[in-house]
Image (cartoon, rainbow, N blue to C red):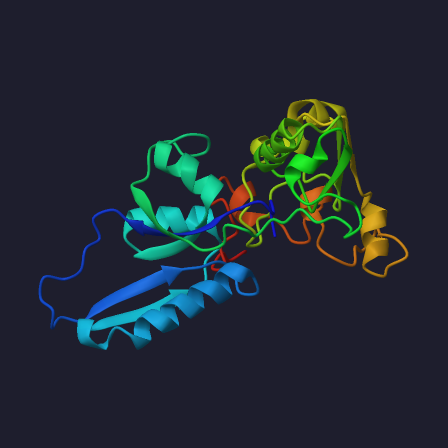
Amino acid sequence: MRNSAWLAVLLFLVGCGSSENASERVFLTVGTAPPGGAFFVVGSAIAEVAQSNAAELSWQVSAQGTKGTQENIRRLQQGDLQFALANAAISYFAVRGEGIWKTPHSVRSVMTLAPNVALFVTPADSGIKTIADLKGKRVVLVDDSIVRGTTSTKIVEMVRAAGATEVHMRISSPPTTYSCFYGIDTPEREQLMASQHSVQQMADIIGVDSLAFISIDGLYRAVGEAKRDSDAPQYCDACFTGEYPIPLVDRDGGGAPKQLSLLTERD
């Protein structure tokens, strides 16, 4: 999961009330995320449960796979979706019109679905039962990635507030320095912390005593390869290397889309 300390929230467009005529069929769509992720499964389940209890309301509820939070919020605003799952941190800035959001987006959180996704774990015999027990300890935090760095900064602040004498961070992926144009909901490159700062600068911004990432070859070894084949990479690793496996037609053509369109044709 990207930035593991996220909260999943169910959003709806402010003012999208039900039909005045109870007998009129109302179609409601729940925006989720790409198939294969937790949002798609959870959103589909919510739509199924809502549909099974909507007979008297003349509702037709369905789930729709999307590219993720940013698309969901924009489509809520445009009226293409009536409900959606969203990352709480991204929603916070969207509502205020800050960061990548040029104007405030009128969406409202109606349900918090996963407030405890991120867990601090420790060996049973460590003697640490609560975060307060970190006082006087040297702590090493491990995360899957650093995108903007906002979540990492908050976690580090929390651990330091508990009294940890040192806080170190280790990341189980290489630095994310390029945007994904193949369906993963990542921000534009200038908003990726690793694309704008050195590892030491990132450590200073996040507030850790040291920061280290797995190497690209180390990542390939972790999935059973001897190393990365630089001539023909075994997997798509464009967000780490900038080597996109197919041309970025929409981006390089000067178009506005943030992701490659599935409908784009080449001469």
In the image, residue 204 sits, relative to residue 36, either above or below, namely above
Expressed as whole percent of the image width and height from the top left, the position of residue 38 reads 54, 61
Counting every numbered tag in the picture gives: 0
Question: Along the horizontal axis of the image, is 223 left or right of 18?
Answer: right
Q: Residue at x 75, y 28 (%)?
A: 136
Q: Nearer the viewer, residue 4 or 262?
A: 4
Question: Along the horizontal axis of the image, is 259 left or right of 125?
Answer: left
In the image, residue 157 sits, relative to residue 31, either above or below, namely above
Expressed as whole percent of the image width and height from the top left, the position of residue 147 reads 62, 39
Q: Residue furthest left?
A: 21
- Tell me where residue 44 sits by quadrant: bottom left
Q: Is residue 256 visible?
A: no
Expressed as whole percent of the image width and height from the top left, the position of residue 253 reads 52, 43
Quarter containing the C terminus: bottom right
In the image, residue 205 sits, relative to residue 188, either above or below, namely above
- Tell me where residue 160 sits by quadrant: top right
- Tell me where residue 85 sits by quadrant: bottom left
Q: Residue at x 9, y 61 (%)?
A: 20
Q: Residue at x 81, y 59 (%)?
A: 223
Q: Is residue 80 visible?
A: yes
Expressed as whole percent of the image width and height from the top left, the position of residue 245 reads 69, 53
Q: Nearer the viewer, residue 190 or 107?
A: 107
Question: Along the horizontal axis of the image, is 107 left or right of 120?
Answer: left
In the image, residue 17 sits, relative to residue 92, either above or below, namely below
